[in-house]
Amino acid sequence: MNGGLPPERRNATQRLELWIGIECTFNRVRENYLNQLEVCGHHERLDDLNLLSTLGAKCIRYPVLWEQVAPESLEQFDWSWTDARLQRLRELEMQPIATLLHHGSGPRYTSLLDPEFPEKLAAYAGEVARRYPWLRTYTPVNEPLTTARFSGLYGIWYPHHATDEAFVRMLLNECRGTVLAMRAIREVQPGRS
């Protein structure tokens, strides 16, 4: 029954594990970005991780957000915020599930309608895997259907389209981006999920 699970998770049916997450939406409306990490104050509070660790969680969905780390280009990275937090999670023995895109359309040099979006996301994912070779688990695109609906069907989030065609194209770009991102990660870290 557990044959498809990695060895460290095979006994999960025999014990309950608490997994938690930080709400890390980083979306764009017109030319303004909403960074939920800043809105809730977590962006400035490294000590939040100490408090979260007291819950006894084994895993935490945690942002390694493309828009935050590489806002200007795929050649310029600011890892400082992410480095500090991922190191603290290691010290606390909480396994991060690295979220690369969370209700976002990517940095200003791309969008969910960009035909090169999947390859750009994959390039970023490869950089993350090289930077943090100890990461084991990833979420390249969080809730692709929700993001495609709000960005391509309802027109609320960037790039503000409201057609079936835009919705489907965005969803396909997110799905292809996820596949290519995982391939890029596995090239650097074989066997990752």
Image (cartoon, rainbow, N blue to C red):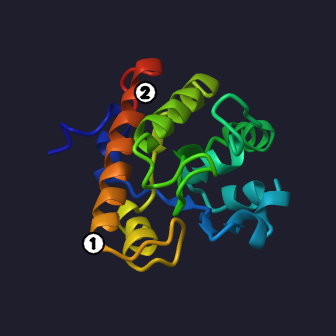
| Percent of width and height locating residue 158 | 54, 67
Is residue 174 something that shows in the picture?
yes
Location of mark 1 (residue): 164
Q: Nearer the viewer, residue 59 or 81?
A: 81
Q: Nearer the viewer, residue 27 or 3?
A: 27
- Whether 52 is drawn above or below 95: the answer is below
| Percent of width and height locating residue 181 | 42, 36
What label sits on residue 111 in the rendered view? none
Location of mark 2 (residue): 184
Instruction: Give the quarter of the figure containing the N terminus.
Output: top left
Q: Determine whether the residue tagged by mark 1 lies in a helix, strand or loop.
A: helix
- Whether 69 is drawn above or below 32: the answer is above
Which residue appears at 18% of the width and 37% of the height? 3
Of the numbered discs 2 and 1, the one sitting upstream in the chain is 1
Instruction: Give the quarter of the figure containing the C terminus.
Output: top left
Name the kind of residue labelled 1 in the image: Asp
Q: Measure the C-alpha gap from mark 2 to mark 1.
A: 30 Å
Name the kind of residue labelled 2 in the image: Ala
Q: Determine whether the residue tagged by mark 2 lies in a helix, strand or loop.
A: helix
| Percent of width and height locating residue 37 | 72, 63
